[in-house]
Image (cartoon, rainbow, N blue to C red):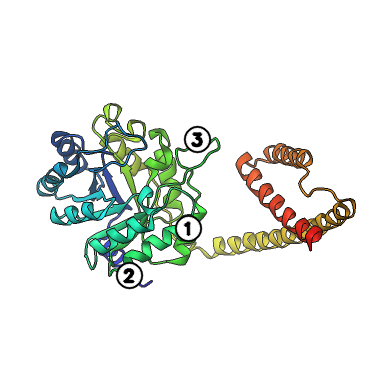
Amino acid sequence: MENTNFRVWLENMQLNHPLVIAGPCSAETEKQVLDVAHELKNTDATIFRAGVWKPRTRPGTFEGNGAKALPWLHKVKEETGLLTAIEVANAQHAKLALEFDIDVLWIGARTTVNPFAVQEIAEALRDTDKIVLVKNPINPDLELWIGAIERFLKMGVKNLGAIHRGFSFFGKSKYRNIPSWQIPIDLKNRYPSLPIINDPSHISGNRELISEVSQTALDLKFDGLMIETHCNPDKAWSDAKQQIKPKRLIEIMDNLKVRKPRFENEEYISKLNAFRQEINEKDDQLMETLSERMKIVESIGRSKRESNVAVLQNTRWQEILQNMVDKGLDQGLTQAFVEKIFKAIHQESIVHQEKIING
């Protein structure tokens, strides 16, 4: 993918801070929209966001004001000079957004999982010069995310970017949607010129975590932030806990540190190279240890085959996992990390033993 027009647009803006997209979760009333927008005019925000159509999990909750809120966004642009952004979930939404000259259209996580819906929206936006941002799907599926982006590319939409809003998780977590940072990093590696915006509001689900998540995103060289902002967040009609006041947005942006893209001092570069060599050696040792472990696993598989014993020995597996979690915690590792690593090792062990027993 060559540099997208959105990447060129960002470079031409010459901002001295990351791009900031801010505004309420939902466009509740015309007054609320305009009040928030006028306060955001005095912040680092460049683009005003507001949910016009709100896909909710269950019926009966506030699902947005729909098309009647679009003129409110038009007033925002006229009165504040801020660009405007909304989520579109189907082709009709997209057509209405173009009709009301909305500047940025984003595809929500619930829509990204549906290639049919994405295709219809892409066709409705064929050859548009509007900025189109594709949120990651709810589930951690990089190929599904990339597939949605490519559908817009094939329809001649060049002003493209991505939004990382975290992923659903069924375990315990302090986040509403776990970041799984490696997935957007993989996307960046596949498409280096594609701008990626982080959405700390949806990752956090809690306004107290927004600053922390935002800093991590900047440390990982994300291009901007989408932060839900409301003049009275506790009274918001949707997602009240993850919205902040414009004043707090200013504080967060003032405290964020934008890191240099690389070391410039020769002494530090030398130190970094030494550390990297140490990591390379440790990685080699890890691979050798894993290979040796799998050879032992295969010996166990041969014993099971001779005795006609099932591959899965669940009591033994639970003992191993709990033992490794306890040791990991003692070594300063998180339980989630240790469980993920050893579950992957266990799955590979099963594959090896299956080949021995049924091969």
Residue at image location 79% in from the left, 55% down from the top: 293
Q: Answer with left or right where residue 284 lies relative to residue 253.
A: right
Q: Are marks 1 and 2 in contact (CB under 8 Å)?
A: no
Give the camera-side residue of 91 and 229. 91
In the picture shown, does residue 335 fall above or below 276? Answer: above
Judged by depth in the image, the label closer to the viewer, 1 or 3, is 1
Q: Are marks 1 and 3 in contact (CB under 8 Å)?
A: no
User: Number of marks in the image?
Assistant: 3
Q: Which mark is residue 174?
A: 3
The residue positioned farthest toward the bottom in the image shown = 2
Quick one: SS at disc 2?
A: helix
* Circle 1 residues within 10 Å: few <14, some 14–19, many ≥20: some
Give the camera-side residue of 160 and 346. 346
Q: Amino acid at mark 3?
A: Lys
Q: Which residue is mark 2?
A: 154
Q: Amino acid at mark 1?
A: Leu
Q: Position of residue 263 (x, y in %)?
A: 49, 62
Residue at image location 42% in from the left, 66% down from the top: 192
Q: Position of residue 103 (x, y in %)?
A: 20, 55
Q: Position of residue 102 (x, y in %)?
A: 18, 53
Q: Position of residue 53 (x, y in %)?
A: 25, 43
Q: Quadrant of residue 59?
A: top left
- Residue 194 in view here: no
Judged by depth in the image, the label closer to the viewer, 3 or 2, is 2
In the picture shown, does residue 337 fall above or below 206? Answer: below
Q: CA distance from mark 1 to mark 2?
A: 18 Å
